[in-house]
Image (spheres, helix red, strand yellow):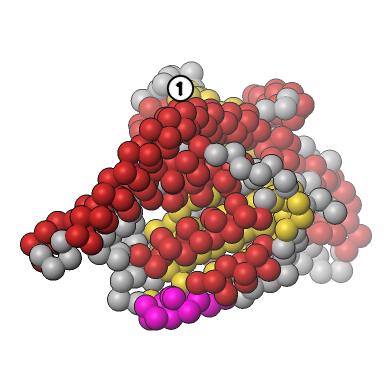
């Protein structure tokens, strides 16, 4: 190595002398340049402003740039982003003062790969002692060169494996990714090298999650877990990740390497299975309610009719005695409420007609609107469409979907006792990569408290007051359960979105009829 360095330095000063002492000796300069071309050390000559005037073949081999690509450019073409502005400021301060600068520099090859060089940069002076050029010599360490060859072998191996591989330095800057990483994330090597892995963050994990991760690997231990990350195009994906620290011969951590498996497909299957399990559990709950309802309907309605008839008789008989008529009226109101609960149970348990047929949901909603619009206007409630689009037909039992529409409108009406607005919109929506229809019912009522959102579709759950019918407090807790069951029966989904004092939005997704 010392011999290489001596020969290279000797060639430097010979070239410098020939350039500035023998202005007419271009042929001699060419001969000396040819000699430098044989040097195994990468060499670069720039003018005073830093523009590259010469590079030798060793430079081309190491940087992967041809001389034609870099001549006229500045050494910034190799800049890795690993050094601070102060680093380069100190370098220039040294050489502009007429001194030689020695040090290690991280550079970036044309293909984006980082590499480390030990460099010395010397100023060249003309016959008047004025700096006119700078000469940069990249010294070759044979041991490092051999190590780099081994790294290249390892890199070639990593390029063949299906798992994503990412390596960072101690500060978390990415210095290597393999082809699998490029394929999955959408980022090319040239885009991602020198960046921080947080460019992939989806926002699903909180800061404490990453704090714990970094704490683990910086302590010298491996971290294992699942992370939801974001591709370059913004699509989220799941990874099973193992991140391990890499230490030098003295046991000091120098790098971190991450092996990552794309488990998005497995996670989606897991979520689908969980949803199926939840739907199965809910169906079992509905079945048990249905069995109860079929018995309750028969055994309760008959005696309830007797109570109702007798109360009406007594009310008629004592219509002049206000102290008695008030009590009988309360009985009749409660009988009416019980009848409503029982009939809701009966509707809940009934399978009804199984005649599915092509249905235009917007036409169906128009029929419902004509039935309820006058009543709603009397209560100062208005229904409007919001960007209604042409949507495909669905395969449906029309009277059941009509019931869903009515129940949701009733639900919004009861949430706005002082009047308000109901907005209904129809949209095209893909469900599991297949065309579908989305219907949104939004109101300007008081909304649903967050702690109730996961319970609103449970049978008998209601936020409305029970007791004497006041015209708005007549909840049975069955309306939304019935809606949920009907939509599920049609292969769709019904969810609620709300926030306190922000109104509620019920979202229906139904599969479109195949063309």
Provide residue 217's location: percent of width, then percent of height: 42, 28
Q: Position of residue 374 (x, y in %)?
A: 48, 79
Stretch of the chain drawn in magenta: 373-386
Tell me residue 61's x, y (percent).
80, 42
Q: Residue at x 50, y 44 (%)?
A: 347
Q: Which residue is mark 1?
A: 222
The answer to whether 59 appears left or right of 385 in the picture is right
The residue depicted at 72 percent of the width and 54 percent of the height is 394
Give the class, few, some or many, for how many residues have Cα within 10 Å of label 1's Cα (few <14, many ≥20). some
Q: Secondary structure at mark 1?
A: loop
Is residue 485 in view from this perspective?
Answer: yes
> Splitting the image into 4 quarters, where does residue 412 fall?
bottom left
Position of residue 212 in the picture relative to residue 99 (left or right): left
In the rendered picture of this protein, how many numbered marks are placed on residues? 1
- Does the magenta segment cover residue 431? no
Q: Residue at x 73, y 25 (%)?
A: 161
Q: Is residue 382 magenta?
A: yes
Asked if residue 320 lies left or right of residue 360, the reply is left
Residue 178: name its quadrant: top right
Check the picture and name the quadrant holding the C terminus. bottom right
Q: Check the image and name the residue furthest to the front.
A: 317
Image coordinates for residue 456, horizontal then vertical, percent = 38, 47
Q: Is residue 36 left or right of residue 143?
A: right
Q: Nearer the viewer, residue 260 or 347?
A: 347
Residue in the foreground of this view, choosing between 182 and 315: 315
């Amino acid at each position: 190595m010392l011999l290489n360095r001596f020969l290279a330095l000797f060639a430097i000063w010979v070239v410098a002398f020939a350039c500035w002492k023998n202005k007419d000796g271009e042929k001699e300069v060419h001969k000396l340049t040819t000699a430098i071309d044989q040097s195994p050390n990468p060499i670069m000559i720039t003018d005073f402003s830093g523009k590259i005037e010469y590079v030798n073949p060793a430079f081309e081999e190491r940087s992967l740039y041809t001389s034609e690509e870099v001549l006229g450019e500045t050494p910034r073409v190799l800049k890795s982003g690993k050094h601070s502005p102060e680093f380069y400021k100190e370098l220039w301060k040294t050489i502009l003062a007429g001194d030689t600068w020695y040090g290690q520099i991280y550079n970036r090859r044309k293909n984006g790969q980082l590499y480390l060089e030990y460099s010395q940069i010397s100023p060249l002076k003309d016959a008047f002692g004025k700096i006119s050029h700078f000469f940069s010599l990249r010294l070759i360490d044979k041991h490092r060169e051999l190590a780099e060859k081994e790294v290249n072998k390892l890199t070639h191996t990593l390029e063949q494996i299906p798992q994503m591989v990412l390596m960072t330095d101690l500060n978390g800057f990415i210095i290597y990714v393999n082809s699998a990483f490029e394929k999955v994330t959408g980022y090319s090597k040239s885009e991602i090298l020198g960046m921080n892995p947080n460019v992939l963050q989806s926002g699903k994990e909180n800061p404490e999650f990453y704090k714990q991760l970094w704490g683990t690997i910086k302590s010298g231990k491996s971290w294992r877990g699942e992370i939801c990350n974001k591709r370059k195009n913004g699509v989220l994906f799941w990874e099973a990740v193992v991140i391990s620290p890499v230490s030098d011969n003295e046991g000091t951590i120098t790098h971190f390497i991450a092996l990552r498996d794309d488990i998005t497909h497995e996670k989606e299957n897991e979520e689908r299975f969980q949803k199926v399990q939840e739907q199965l559990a809910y169906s079992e709950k509905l079945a048990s309610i249905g069995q109860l309802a079929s018995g309750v309907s028969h055994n309760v309605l008959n005696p309830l009719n007797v109570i109702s008839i007798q109360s009406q008789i007594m009310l008629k008989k004592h219509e002049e005695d206000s102290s008695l008529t008030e009590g009988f009226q309360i009985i009749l109101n409660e009988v009416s409420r019980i009848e409503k609960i029982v009939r809701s149970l009966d509707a809940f348990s009934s399978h009804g007609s199984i005649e599915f047929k092509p249905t235009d949901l917007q036409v169906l909603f128009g029929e419902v609107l004509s039935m309820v619009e006058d009543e709603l206007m009397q209560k100062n409630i208005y229904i409007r469409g919001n960007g209604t689009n042409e949507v495909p037909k669905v395969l449906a039992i029309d009277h059941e979907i009509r019931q869903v529409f009515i129940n949701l409108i009733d639900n919004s009406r009861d949430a706005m006792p002082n009047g308000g607005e109901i907005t209904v919109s129809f949209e095209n929506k893909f469900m599991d990569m297949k065309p579908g229809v989305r219907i949104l019912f939004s109101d300007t009522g008081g909304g649903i408290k967050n702690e109730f959102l996961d319970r609103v579709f449970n049978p008998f759950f209601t936020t409305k007051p029970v007791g004497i019918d006041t015209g708005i407090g007549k909840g049975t807790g069955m309306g939304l359960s019935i809606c949920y069951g009907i939509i599920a029966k049609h292969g769709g989904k019904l969810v609620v979105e709300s926030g306190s004092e922000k109104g509620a939005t019920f979202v229906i997704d139904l599969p479109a009829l195949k063309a």
